[in-house]
Image (cartoon, rainbow, N blue to C red):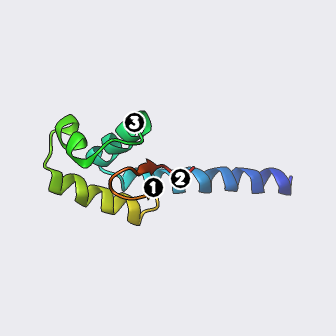
Amino acid sequence: MTETIFALKMAQTEKVVTEKVTAKVTENQKRILEEVRKNKSVTTNELSVIIGISVRKIKENIKKLKDKDLLGRVGPDKGGHWEIPE
């Protein structure tokens, strides 16, 4: 019985944590992540055209995603690629 209660509390905790993380990601940030999943070498200029916001706003959103450990860059600006941590 104690194991069942513990399992239920863990499931509820995981759901709350997931909801908090999801709620803190804006629509544009979600779209950036979607595009990076499709093309890990996509540039900020390409993201700007695809999403329809300025390059400056793309860079701001990428910084926020990096700060939340939802997006990372491997290699240099030219020739590198994006990574989405699991």
- Mark 1, Cα crowd under 10 Å, few <14 / some 14-19 / many 20+, is some
Task: Locate residue 29, reporting x and y percent.
Answer: 31, 48
Residue 50's place in the image compared with 70, above or below, is above
Instruction: Pick out the residue farthest to the bottom.
Output: 67
In this view, the mark in front (2 or 3): 3
Q: CA distance from mark 2 to mark 3?
A: 15 Å
Q: Quick check: 9 left or right of 46?
A: right
Q: Could you say whether the residue bearing mark 3 is in a helix, strand or loop?
A: loop
Which of the two labelled residues, at mark 1 and mark 3, occupies the earlier sequence position? Answer: 3
Q: Residue at x 75, y 51 (%)?
A: 7
Which of the two labelled residues, at mark 2 and mark 1, occupies the earlier sequence position? Answer: 1
In this view, the mark in front (1 or 3): 3
Task: Locate residue 69, reporting x and y percent.
Answer: 46, 61
Compare residues 80 and 51 and report the one nearer the observer. 80
Residue located beneath label 1 in the image: 70
Compare residues 14 and 80 and report the one nearer the observer. 80
Disc 1 marks a residue whose amino acid type is Leu
Residue 19's place in the image compared with 40, above or below, is below
